[in-house]
Amino acid sequence: MLDRASAEHALAALETGRVSGIAAMDDRDALELLLVHRPRWLSPGLAARIARVVELDPPSIEPFAVGESLVLVKDSSRGRGRALRFAIASSADATRAFGERALAQIRQAQRALLDLVYQRGRAWPEGVERPALPAVFGLSSSERIDEESLGLSVAIAELSRATRTPVRATVAATARVSRDGKLGAVAFVPEKIAALRAEWPMIDTLIVAEDTAAIDDLPAGFTVARARTLADAIERFGLSLDALSASSVEHAEVIESQLERRSKQPHSPDDWGALADDATDASLVLLADGQRDRAMRARAWAALFRVHAGRSYEVDENEVEEDISRYDPRVIAAMAVSRATAAIDKALDTCVARAERAVELASACGDRAILARALGTLGRAQTHTGSPERAEPLFREAIALWTEVEQPQVAQTMCYLATSLRRAGDAQQAMNVAKEALERCARRGSTAYTDETARFAALELGRCQLELRMFDEADVSLARVVREEFGDASYPNIGAIVTRCIARFERGDEAGGRADLARCLRVAETPGAIGRAALQAVGERMLRGDADERARQAWSARGLPEDRQGVEREVWAWVY
């Protein structure tokens, strides 16, 4: 069945008469099939256009289900807006292809919603998964969303899921959400309105931030409603916080009183994550009740639990760092690990010193799991900064500690060890370690954590096989890594595409190599670490003297060094 991009291309060709004969008949048949199956990305406007071409009555398109809404984004290359259905739920025909700006806004909007829920004396319902990454229908594998305008829509869809109430079918939104729940203006609003009218004609109201610029020449019957806060916008979608159960201060107090005891018990990474969510919920209830000290303690424990869960990227230092010296030493050590982890991606020149400090604090706090994570972080910092021989003993010590506490992080740390061995020139031993990591994941069984670790282990295995010029075996390993629903601009997807690109060029497959290089160049436009990781393929081509002008321009656009020594340093730093 056609995807959205192919359907739009075929439809445009038929509408303009660019195709005829058997090819036109094939396109008509394929488009007619869409009207029968009605995939979730099919909008009423697109369905009506297809129906006109194939001379059928347009089908009715399902209204938004619980947890669904529209995300309005800009298509700068075509100077237009796009209106895409999305869901806060997993789906086989939806992707989670977001850039770093969009991901940051999604998390911020979700946190603002949770704050609002608990400020109003309500509780997140039991049995409903905590706020999760939305899935967008109709994006191709090479497309991604990287703008902040989806924040309000995501928060509304989350509340729809929590209250089990569909959003009002005639309303859409485009605004970013700040941490305190205030709405901010976004660009391309007229173009997004045009997309709404063309794709979703039943939408007659668009919610925007109060400070959005004036919009001229609105379509007849269409309203732009301004809102100052997330709370203001919620009612316009037919939702209410009152539909949630009342929160229990007593229950939050019990949870907070148990956090220290529970912090000393063994947990799986997934259980640590659930415990972090419980601590966060308790902190919000206690804060709304005026119990600030207890709320801050709960937030500090939540930070520790997130580091244990391998989710240190979620730790917001501004939420807990008032006088951090008064917290439990394990919390202080966990925050140090979080800072060191962030520095590997954002401040490479400081990451080793930060990681060494984290190891020092972790050694003093007496928590073997925190020490294991600190050692692993220092090993990663040493590998990224060009000292893989120093990383190996750190990873081996971390593996020994993880084994003592019987945690599945053994396999993850083995992936890092394999990378350091490969970088130190021992690809054969690295390959054996990566295989052992995969075997450990298989023995553990399928969980979210082990499945993700297995993808990284398969990526490292593919890298080792490339080093050993085992091209066919590398193809098999890398095929285990790529998950199309997450898009190219995600990790470890982009790592596998970069590696496959290098392998194809090395084995003489110029067409395949250039196709993968084109995918890398598209991802390279993404801000932040993902974009730079994609440029590793360009760096490898530059070192071989084979980079074309477009590739060199993408490299220089990042302000990266273009001399050979500088290129080698950049390629080395992005070891995955």
Image: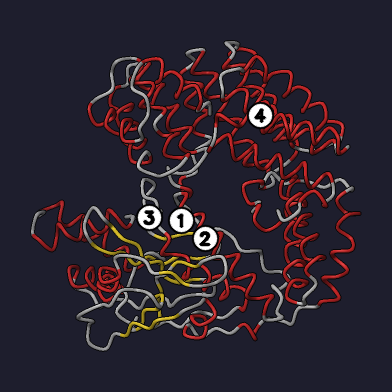
Q: Is residue 456 left or right of residue 367?
A: left
Mark pair 4, 3: CA separation: 41 Å
Q: Which residue is mark 2?
A: 106
Q: Are marks 1 and 4 in contact (CB under 8 Å)?
A: no
Disc 2, SS: helix
Q: Residue at x 74, y 18 (%)?
A: 393
User: Which is more N-terminal, label 2 or label 3?
Assistant: 2
User: Which is more N-terminal, label 3 or label 1?
Assistant: 1
How dense is the environment of label 3, judged by Cα within 10 Å: few (below 14), some, or many (20 and up)? Answer: many
Where residue 58 appears, as percent x and y from the top left, is 27, 76
Query: Is residue 27 something that shows in the picture?
Result: no
Q: Are marks 1 and 2 in contact (CB under 8 Å)?
A: yes
The three-letter code of the residue at mark 3 reads Leu
Q: Quadrant of residue 561?
A: top left
Mark sitting on residue 353:
4
Question: In front here: 207 or 164?
Answer: 207
Q: Are marks 1 and 3 in contact (CB under 8 Å)?
A: no
Vertical order, 161 against 275 (above or below): below
Q: Are marks 2 and 4 in contact (CB under 8 Å)?
A: no
Q: Is residue 338 left or right of residue 51?
A: right
Where residue 147 appears, as percent x and y from the top left, is 40, 57
Q: Residue at x 77, y 41 (%)?
A: 333
Disc 1, SS: helix
Mark pair 1, 4: CA separation: 30 Å
The three-letter code of the residue at mark 2 reads Ile
Q: Which residue is mark 1?
A: 102
Q: Are marks 4 and 3 in contact (CB under 8 Å)?
A: no
Mark sitting on residue 139:
3
